Amino acid sequence: MTAVMSNSSGRGILPPPDAVVTWMKAADTAAILIAAALPWSTTLVAVFVVAWLIALAPTIKVHDFMDLFRRPACLLPVVFFVLAVLGLLWSEAPWHDRLYGIGPMAKLLAIPLLIYHFQRSARGMWIFAAFLASCTILMCMSWLVAFDPRWALKKDAEYGVPVKNYIDQSQEFALCAVALAWPILKTIRTRHYGPAVAYVVLAAAFLVNMMYVTVSRTTLVAMPVMLVAFAAFHLRRRGTVTAVVVLALAVGALWFVAPNLRMRTQAAISEYQQYHDANAASSVGLRLEFWRKSLRFLAEEPVLGHGTGSIRTMFARSAKGQTGASAEIINNPHNQTLNVAVQWGIVGVVILYAMWIAHLLLFRGGHGLPVWVGLLVVVQNVVSSLFNSHLADFNEGWMYVLGVGIAGGIVLRGSGTSKAEADVPGRAKGIPAQDG
């Protein structure tokens, strides 16, 4: 079987079965490396994404891949990207800004590819494990940097932040801490108390780090919503009520024992007052100013917006002759809805929300860790995108793409054997596809 062979349906040409297995293992390995690198490096993630695409390409059967686009969860990310490309035509920005504006949306194209691959691969849970392990190492490094800044891997590092920034780190730690709620619940219900204790300790370690080292205000808002989502989907009604009460009491207790939380909350009030009284360029004040201007830009071009990459141009135009917060020029209004609305108008906003809803529905009514992780990354992205453009941002955007794509593929594979699965060597021989 040295020659390249065509599949029986004539729907494309695949390498021999042994080569397919080899390429799929290579793609799995690249995906594991992407997840492991994400908390640490943008460059490594980009390199491993290219490697993953190269390894994936020989395994794709075009007809089966195109069948996925009957699902809105796969189709809408592509539609979103196509809109960004078309937005080049009516953009008011210079061409280098237009082309730069496409980049944040390009990663959405990986969602249908990930779903396709992990419908066939049995190693989806390995990617989640790699991300959790990488974040655990980062959390340990965070404590070291908090006590001795010389451990930081970048110059002028923020307190307790070895790499990147405290917003990315908080989002990663929050995702890991809340995602562990499902294995904690499962191991308790099955009376496997040893693993349950280990999961509780690890989740608590992430939470304590956020309480005493550093945490973003966005995470402080998103985490309670994520925990309520867990209670609503995985606990009975009485358990949900109990969980909400316990959460409220825990938040109240943390207010008194965690000075970092009080400082972050009180600073928000002070920053708003500074903006209100003196148009000061504080963090809260800038967000409010960005949102106010973005709504004005949307009102100017409500249907299709000002085009791809136009945000900086619009803010530069409005900043002329201004001072304080009103003079700031940015390419990110720190709200995903407004980020989309300024560039692609109401049409873009409708596609954005349709995509979020489609991805939420992909994980409705199911059980198991993949369902929970998929639901969680969507909920986290939607809530945190109220205060940041987290779908467009690199770190949080790839967390969303990987979470939805991998969990979506696992869920669809678990719902029934697809035609794509039947072509994977080993499946026809009755080898089960387990995610362990």
Image: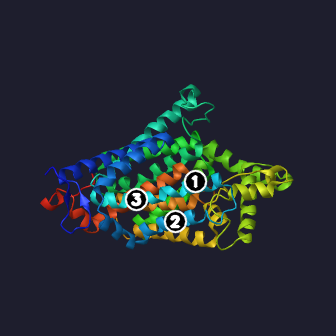
Q: CA distance from mark 1 to mark 3?
A: 33 Å
Q: Amino acid at mark 1?
A: Val
> Are the residues flagged by discs 2 and 3 in contact, CB closer than 8 Å?
no
The three-letter code of the residue at mark 3 reads Gly
Residue drawn at the location 53% of the way across and 27% of the way down: 151
Mark 3 and mark 1 in contact (Cβ < 8 Å)? no
User: How many labels were placed on the picture?
Assistant: 3
**Residue at (13%, 52%) from the top-left corner?**
1
Q: Residue at x 21, y 58 (%)?
A: 424
Query: Could you tell me how far apart the alpha carbons at marks 2 and 3 are, in whole angstroms?
Result: 19 Å
Mark 2 — residue? 82
Q: Which residue does the numbered mark 1 point to in the structure image?
A: 251
Q: Secondary structure at mark 2?
A: helix
Scheme of image coloration: rainbow
Identify the residue position indicated by label 3 in the image: 405
Does 177 sit left or right of 338 as displayed? left
